[in-house]
Image (cartoon, rainbow, N blue to C red):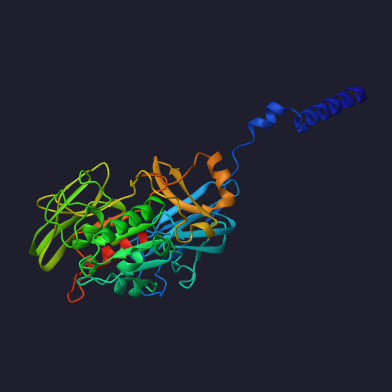
Amino acid sequence: MRKHYLFILLCVFTLLTNCAGGDDPAIASENVGPAVVKTGKLTGKVMSQNGTKPVGGASVFTFDDKYKIYYTTSDADGNFTLVAPAGSRTIHIQTGNGTNFRTEISATVKDSETVNLDASQTKLNQVAKIAYVKGAYDKIEDIIQTLGYTATEITNADLVNLTNIAQYDIIFLNCGSRNNYSSNNPGLYTVIENNLAAFVANGGSIYASDWDVSYLVGGTSNTNNCSLPGGFIPDTKLCSKNIGNSGTVAATVTNPGLTTALGFNTLDINYDLGVWQKIINYDPTYWEVLVKETSSNDALMIRTNHFTATNIPTISIGNASNSTFVTVCITLPGNIQISISVPQVLVPYLVALGATVGPCSGSSNSGYIYYTTFHNHASGNIGNAGVILQYVILNL
């Protein structure tokens, strides 16, 4: 009986030993699943520098320890909710591709909790140096100031000197500024156009409204045909004639990012001058239409970053030489591509994950050119068009 008892104990001991032995790799692998990423939420409201205007359509993102991006955008009221990996993170807030307006925030993301960022943290900072040429019918500098940003007034005489304008990142050309320029030397117009071409080709961005399309396509004031001498945008890319009639035009916003930023996709634009530049023809592979006339589909606001030209001098524009940020293109789930600016030290790691250096579209060196047939009248109320121009300012 004692032998049977000892035998039973030995069997039980052997069975327990085999069950507790965790050295079998096959059994161990069956019980190991993917690591669970701990995440929390950050909420906030993106505001302009002076804290008075919400900024819609801003990119808000961060990275985990393996450089995976966590990304969202602010709505028309500036509100955002970012799901992010738990831990100490740098949160980036940017508009456009992040080269001209951006903010970085240090924040602690708590697992399964929501942390609200203070409004003082989420103001969008101005990185760019901005200049404007005073116009007769346009005052975009007023809109810049209402957002809390600063711009330096320059003249056409400054545009003649490439070194002068190369210190800026963005130049706004107010309607009427070109025909305000009195010069007895027509050759100076060619110098200005060549300088603007060099400015854009090296990464600078410009905005022109209404009659100041002449800076782009030629002419000395308003354009009246498609074959005017001068300009740095080929006539095959853009034709604008001074034949628009005064009145209210029903318009449609055609760019999804602009629609998100605005919170609407239709508006009435008041053309309160007697005549304005009407876009007759444009190259759709070169220009993107952001706003069009609803009934006719005529383009009212266009932009491009496809500018290239030969024999252009290579120059450093604005803050480029001092910047430690690099523009990259990242593909999000759903094959959505975004252009953002990131610290240079992150670039090799992001490229290893599939990112590419440079913007997602356009020429790698080209800045943006925005052209609007409408503008900020010095003596009129432009309504919702003013909100669109705020978008233009922040996305150049």
> Residue, x 64% and y 31% (percent of image)?
30
Front in this rendered view, residue 366 or 127 = 366
**Quarter of the N terminus within the rendering:** top right
Q: Where is residue 303 in the image (x, y as percent from the top left)?
A: 28, 52
Front in this rendered view, residue 303 or 201 = 201
In the displayed structure image, the side of residue 355 where residue 387 appears, left or right: left
Vertical placement of residue 135 versus 3, above or below: below
Give the residue at the far front of this rendering: 184
Vertical placement of residue 264 versus 151, above or below: above
> Residue, x 53% and y 46% (percent of image)?
68
Front in this rendered view, residue 87 or 335 = 335
**Residue 263 visible at all:** no
Q: How many marks?
A: 0
In the displayed structure image, the side of residue 261 where residue 283 appears, left or right: left
Q: Position of residue 306 (x, y in %)?
A: 33, 46
In the displayed structure image, the side of residue 37 where residue 82 appears, left or right: left
Q: Position of residue 338 (x, y in %)?
A: 41, 48
Vertical placement of residue 213 versus 126, above or below: above
Q: Where is residue 281 in the image (x, y as percent from the top left)?
A: 16, 47
Residue 164: name its quadrant.
Answer: bottom left
Residue 169: name its quadrant.
Answer: bottom left
**Quarter of the C terminus within the rendering:** bottom left
Front in this rendered view, residue 53 or 101 = 101
**Residue 207 visible at all:** yes
